[in-house]
């Protein structure tokens, strides 16, 4: 059999409740930031593809919002639909859980996995925090009783522990298929999308409590000029009071966000970045299907 016939390619959905390390895992596989990461749940709102191509396979990781119970707003329902659709389309599912903490939302994800058609490999993330290591055997045994997993692999996405073993395992579950993306593709998302996500990441890191869930970022202008890249972005919030919180006293917080985003983008893009931010109010945008669509959120 020729190399061409043996080539494997498929969709690998990374599924789990919020804040278990799904995006951190994908970034570790890719060796670069494809998805933004914060310690706050629901940082990932979109389906993001990360394409890892090698001589014998192309693994298309699907980063998804965390499956969660909070469904009061249209955006929460949209995120759950996005994750569920990725699960339905996958050739392989990586179920990520936090080995240090099991919740009812993990049980909810297991329930969804039972109705899926794709094989599932379970990942016990944050295994580096388990001491003594014998406790991992207990965790593996407990998890094996929850579902018929093809494999259970303890990992640390943050420390890159056991990821090589996992990466070698994945192609065994992918179909024989030619590559779906050119070999130099890293993600299906545009640089403008990534720019908006980096800005939102900095906002999420610097703001407190519930406010990060009530804002989104829209790129109005992205132009490559002789002096660098000129970017104009709007930060949308839901109430006037939130606008003041994002701007901060004498504009300090907004300046801090702009500086952090500009420095990271300049490093990633290897060019000077000129970034201007505005904060505007669109009442209750996160509970309006049309506003969500206008801001680029998937509707199904």
Image (tube, rainbow, N blue to C red):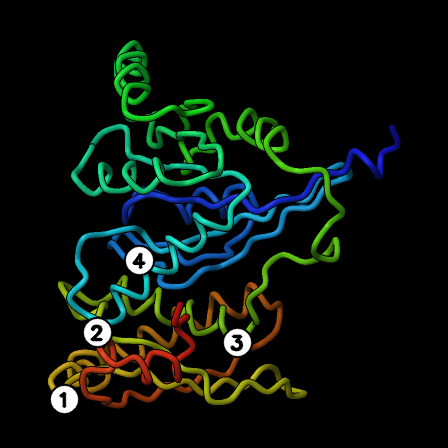
Give the quadrant of the C terminus: bottom left
Residue at mark 4: 80
Are dots 1 and 4 in contact, CB under 8 Å?
no
Distance, label 3 to label 4, CA atoms, is: 24 Å
- The crowd level at tag 3 (other Cα within 10 Å; few <14, some 14-19, many 20+) is some
Q: Is residue 199 above or below residue 276?
A: above
Lower position in the chain sequence, tag 3 or tag 4: 4
- The crowd level at tag 1 (other Cα within 10 Å; few <14, some 14-19, many 20+) is few
Of residues 14 and 35, the one drawn nearer to the viewer in this rendering:
14
Distance, label 1 to label 4, CA atoms, is: 28 Å
- The crowd level at tag 2 (other Cα within 10 Å; few <14, some 14-19, many 20+) is some
Residue at mark 2: 214
| Foreground: disc 1 or disc 4 | 4
Distance, label 1 to label 2, CA atoms, is: 12 Å
Residue at mark 1: 240
Are dots 3 and 1 in contact, CB under 8 Å?
no
In this rendering, would 107 be left or right of 182?
A: left
Q: In the orientation shown, which residue stands out farthest toward the top?
A: 134
Lower position in the chain sequence, tag 2 or tag 3: 3
């Amino acid at each position: 059999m020729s190399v061409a016939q043996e080539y494997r390619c498929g969709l690998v959905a990374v599924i789990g409740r919020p804040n278990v390390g799904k995006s951190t895992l994908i970034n570790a596989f890719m060796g670069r930031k494809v998805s933004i990461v914060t310690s706050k749940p629901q940082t990932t709102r979109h389906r993001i593809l990360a394409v890892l191509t090698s001589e014998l396979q192309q693994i298309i990781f699907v980063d998804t919002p965390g499956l969660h119970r909070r469904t009061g707003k249209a955006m929460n329902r949209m995120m759950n639909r996005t994750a569920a659709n990725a699960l339905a389309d996958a050739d392989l599912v990586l179920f990520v859980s936090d080995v240090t903490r099991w919740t009812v939302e993990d049980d909810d994800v297991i329930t969804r996995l039972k109705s899926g058609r794709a094989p599932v490999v379970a990942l016990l993330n944050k295994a580096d925090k388990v001491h003594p290591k014998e406790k991992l055997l207990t965790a593996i045994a407990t998890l094996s009783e929850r579902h018929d997993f093809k494999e259970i692999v303890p990992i640390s996405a943050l420390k890159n522990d056991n990821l090589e073993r996992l990466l070698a395992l994945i192609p065994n579950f992918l179909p024989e298929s030619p590559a779906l993306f050119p070999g130099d593709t890293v993600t299906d998302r545009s640089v403008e999308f990534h720019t908006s996500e980096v800005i939102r990441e900095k906002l999420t890191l610097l703001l407190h409590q519930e406010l990060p869930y009530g804002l989104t970022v829209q790129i109005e202008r992205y132009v490559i000029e002789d002096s660098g890249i000129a970017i104009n972005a709007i930060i949308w919030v839901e109430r006037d009071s939130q606008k003041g919180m994002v701007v901060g006293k004498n504009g300090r917080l907004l300046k801090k966000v702009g500086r952090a985003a500009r420095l990271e983008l300049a490093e990633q893009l290897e060019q000077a970045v000129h970034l201007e931010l505005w904060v505007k109010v669109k009442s209750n945008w996160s509970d309006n299907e049309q506003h969500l669509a206008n801001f680029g959120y998937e509707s199904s």
